[in-house]
Image: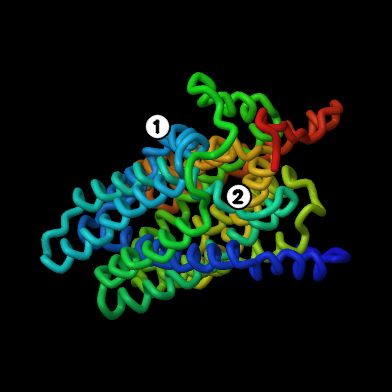
Amino acid sequence: MVAVPGTAETFRASMALLRTRRFGTFWVASLLSNIGTWAQQVAQPWLMLSLSGSSFLVGLDAFAMDAPAWGLTLVGGVLADRGDRRKIIFGFQALQMLCPTLLVVLLLTGAVQPWMIIVLSLVVGVTDALSMPSFASIVPSLVERGQIGTGIALNSTQFNLSRILGPAVAGVLLAGAGAVGCFAVSAASYLPFILVALWVLPHGRPQNVGPRKQAFSGLGVILKDPVLRGALLTVFITASLCSPLITFCPVLVTEVFKAGAASFSGSIAAFGLGGLLGALALLGIEGRFDRRKLSTRAGAFYGVVVIACALAPWLWMVPVLLVLAGISMSVSNTQANSILQTAAGPSLRGQTASMMMLAMRGGMSTGSLVTGISSHYLGVQWALLINGILAVALHLVLHSLALRKRGEGQGPSTPTSPAGTR
């Protein structure tokens, strides 16, 4: 990304937010939690592939984890806006922590079966769908309204840093203790986040909660706005057509390039490095460019990278391309999320986050299942090639429609929540 005047100053001002007590502590706890999550995300598809040898079951497992978003994420958004977020996060995280713990027990006793992994993924998917809107509303509650974009970009840096550290930890553990070590680290990583979230989140229900019949009223505010609709569509296209590149990376590495776990974990770490670079770049240009353009163009570039991965003739190209994939994913999703969160007032942040999560997790579940089927019949390279071509085409159409509306005099809008803003 090209540097612009004031980039260094903007970057330093953005990083100063990390020195605040509440946000900085939350950032560190989130990093530790996500390192454990990524260690499991590396180990789980590898374990599934080792047990079953089926790319379809790898896709089905990912589908089980992401599919509950379709039916429950909006409910989770209402819970976040109308319930006690501290209790929501504590309850669902405690339940979710039991899943990797149980996998550790199953692996140590030699009783693990593919269907057990899928069932536990479904439990994680349900708890994620109901609690993630509460998670996503934490950052806007810790910063001033004008710092929301910076807070989201900083949160993206820790998430993508964990994409580097988590797979690195997983690679060491897989080579030594095996998958059981990854699941043990994942289970332990829940504790710091739960404790810090209980500390930084306010007690009780959010203020300005409307009557029950208006529980889903914020969805209409979001869906009626063309800019916000465009942000959600961008996230959905990227999640459904480009994210399967990560889900099926172990299939690509093992079946096409005949490589092992080290190459797979290294490729996922490369994706995390790219995501970190993209998030850091955004910290230096926050507020300087049209977020909508950045989001759709980065999404289209992600599709190009998926095509390149499908056609790559050598293994060394995969991690290089995944760095580019991480950059484009980070820029596209962070900008879309900033559009949504900046437009929402405190009483609707949960529902805004739920729409973002529905587009992302719902898209990932659909993409994983469809790509699993197409990979089974056509091979993983053809499946990814088709995904990439469709992603580029759809993002370009979306970008063209956005430019046409702007040419007709309809600029970016920022609808205000009925309850006002911070």
Q: Residue at x 29, y 51 (%)?
A: 95
Which picture quadrant has residue 131?
top left
Q: Residues within 10 Å of mark 2 (few under 14, many from 20)?
A: some
Along the viewing direction, whichever of 409 and 154 lies nearer the viewer: 154
Which picture quadrant has residue 217?
top right
Is 405 on the left-hand or right-hand side of 155? right
Residue 148, horizontal then vertical, whole percent? 68, 51
Mark 1 residue element: helix
Is 419 on the left-hand or right-hand side of 258? right
Pointer 2 residue: 141
Which picture quadrant has residue 155?
bottom right
Indicate whether 376 appears above or below 401: below
Q: How is the image coloured?
A: rainbow
Comparing labels 1 and 2, the label whose residue is closer to the camera: 2
Q: Is residue 314 visible?
A: no
Q: Looking at the picture, which amino acid does disc 2 mark? A: Ser
Report the quarter where the C terminus lies: top right
Q: Residue at x 52, y 50 (%)?
A: 202
Label placed on residue 291 = none
Q: Looking at the picture, which amino acid does disc 1 mark? A: Gly
Along the viewing direction, whichever of 6 and 114 lies nearer the viewer: 6
Report the quarter where the N terminus lies: bottom right
Residue 345, horizontal then vertical, whole percent? 66, 38
Q: Residue at x 56, y 69 (%)?
A: 273
Is 222 on the left-hand or right-hand side of 241? right
Residue 319, horizontal then vertical, whole percent? 52, 68
Q: Residues within 10 Å of mark 1 (few under 14, many from 20)?
A: some
Indicate whether 177 appears above or below 182: below
Q: Is residue 173 visible?
A: yes
Label placed on residue 71 = 1
Outermost residue on the top side: it is 213
Point out the tag, 1 or 2, that comes first from the N-terminus: 1
